[in-house]
C-alpha cells in the first residue's frame, strides 16, 4: 500500500466500499488513485451491463482484430454510460463573439512571451465560467443521491478535460474566482503537460464545480458533452468560425466560438441554461471586464 498515492479521504472511502486499493492500482495501471476511481469502481454492475444481443461474432462478416481496453478506459466508459442513463440531459447551443479576445491576446503577446505563459482563449473561458458560476449559483451545485436536496458550493473549482493517450483526464483548477488570468493560463498549461505525462496528483482531480471540454484545437461545429456527476453541467467548446453578423447596415465577418452546455434537467431548466450561456457569451465578448 505504501507505493499507492491516495489521499486519506480516498483510503477511507475505499475501506467503506470494500475496495482493495492495491488491486485497483494494478487494474488502472497507475499508482495515483483519486476519489472518482473508487466511486466508479463501486458502481453497481447492472448500470453498465450490455444487452446479450450486442455480443456478435464480427468475424463472420470479414477480417477482425481485437484491442484490449485499459482498466482506466473501462472505468471511464462505465461512468459515462451510467451518467447518460441516469441523468436527464439537455444540451443548449449558442455562440460567443471572440473578436475582442483575439485582439486582446495579440496585445498581451509580448507580456505572455516574457512570462513564459501561453495565453490561450481557454483561459478566458475558464475565468468567464467562474464569474458565471458566481452569478448563477444553482449551476455551482450538486444534487444529493436521493434527489431531495441541492448542495450549493461556496467555492469555484473548474475541471479541464484533457485528452491523453491513456484516456480522458480531468484535472481541476481550484478557486478560479480568486485567481487572475495569468495564473489561470499558467495552471492550464501546467496541468495539461502533466496530464499527458501521467503526473497529475490525486488531490488535483475531483471536486470541480463544473468542467470545460475544449475541442477547438481539433475541429467540429457542435457536440453534446456528457455531464460529469456529481456536477450538474458541463461546457463544451469547438473551433472558432467566421460568421456573417448584421450590424444594421451590412454583414460583418465576426469570429464566433460555438458553445455547448449540457445540463441536468432535474436541477436546471431550459430558460436558466439559456440565460447562463448568454451571460457567459457576454463576458467573453468583453474580456477586459474579466480582469476586474
Image: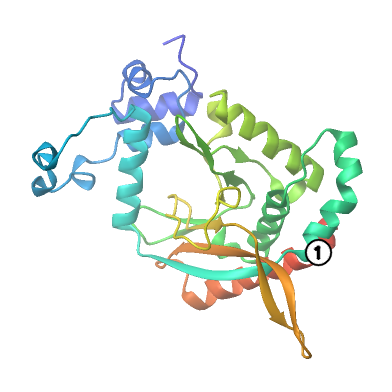
SS class of the residue under badge 1?
helix
User: Please, which colouring scheme is shown?
Assistant: rainbow
Rendering coords of residue 205 (x, y %)? 54, 35
Name of the residue lying farthest toward the top: 2
Q: Quadrant of residue 78?
A: top left
Rendering coords of residue 213 (x, y %)? 54, 50
Name of the residue lying farthest toward the bottom: 249
Residue that appears at 57% across and 57% down? 238
Residue that appears at 68% across and 55% down? 125
Residue that appears at 60% across and 57% down? 239
**Label 1: which residue?**
100
**Visible in this render: residue 39?**
yes
Residue that appears at 64% across and 73% down? 278
Name of the residue lying farthest toward the front: 62
Q: Is residue 93 above or below residue 32?
A: below
- Front residue of 287/11: it is 287
Position of the C terminus by quadrant? bottom right
Position of the N terminus by quadrant? top left
Judged left or right of residue 97, residue 259 is left
Rendering coords of residue 12 (x, y %)? 41, 26
Q: Is residue 81 above or below residue 195?
A: below
- Front residue of 53/36: it is 53
- Front residue of 206/111: it is 111
Judged left or right of residue 179, residue 281 is left
Badge 1 density bin: few <14, some 14–19, many ≥20, Cα 10 Å: some
Q: Quadrant of residue 40?
A: top left
**Visible in this render: residue 180?**
no
Judged left or right of residue 113, residue 232 is left
Q: Is residue 118 above or below residue 245?
A: above
* Number of marks in picture: 1
Amino acid at each position: 500500500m505504501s507505493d499507492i498515492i491516495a489521499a486519506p479521504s480516498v483510503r477511507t472511502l475505499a475501506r467503506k466500499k470494500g475496495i482493495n486499493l492495491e488491486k485497483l492500482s494494478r487494474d488502472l495501471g497507475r499508482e495515483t488513485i483519486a476519489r472518482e476511481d473508487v466511486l466508479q469502481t463501486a458502481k453497481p454492475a447492472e448500470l453498465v451491463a450490455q444487452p446479450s444481443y450486442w455480443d456478435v461474432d464480427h468475424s463472420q462478416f470479414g477480417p477482425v482484430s481485437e484491442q484490449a481496453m485499459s482498466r482506466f478506459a473501462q472505468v471511464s466508459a462505465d461512468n459515462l454510460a451510467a451518467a447518460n442513463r441516469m441523468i436527464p440531459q439537455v444540451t443548449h447551443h449558442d455562440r460567443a463573439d471572440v473578436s475582442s479576445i483575439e485582439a486582446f491576446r495579440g496585445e498581451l503577446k509580448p507580456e505572455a512571451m516574457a512570462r513564459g505563459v501561453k495565453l490561450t482563449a481557454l483561459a478566458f473561458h475558464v475565468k468567464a465560467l467562474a464569474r458565471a458560476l458566481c452569478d448563477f449559483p444553482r449551476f455551482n451545485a450538486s444534487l444529493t443521491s436521493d434527489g431531495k436536496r441541492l448542495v450549493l458550493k461556496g467555492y469555484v473549482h473548474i475541471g479541464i478535460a484533457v485528452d491523453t493517450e491513456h484516456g480522458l483526464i480531468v484535472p481541476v483548477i481550484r478557486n478560479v474566482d480568486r485567481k487572475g488570468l495569468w495564473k489561470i493560463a499558467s495552471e492550464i498549461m501546467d496541468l495539461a503537460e502533466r496530464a499527458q505525462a501521467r503526473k497529475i496528483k490525486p488531490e488535483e482531480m475531483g471536486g470541480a464545480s463544473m468542467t470545460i471540454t475544449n475541442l477547438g484545437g481539433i475541429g467540429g461545429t457542435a457536440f453534446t458533452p456528457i455531464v460529469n456527476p456529481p456536477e450538474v453541467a458541463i461546457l463544451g467548446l469547438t473551433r472558432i468560425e467566421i460568421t456573417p453578423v448584421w450590424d444594421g447596415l451590412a454583414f460583418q465577418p465576426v469570429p464566433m466560438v460555438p458553445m455547448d452546455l449540457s445540463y441536468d434537467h432535474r436541477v436546471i431548466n431550459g430558460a436558466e441554461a439559456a440565460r447562463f450561456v448568454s451571460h457567459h457569451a457576454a463576458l467573453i465578448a468583453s474580456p477586459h471586464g474579466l480582469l476586474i
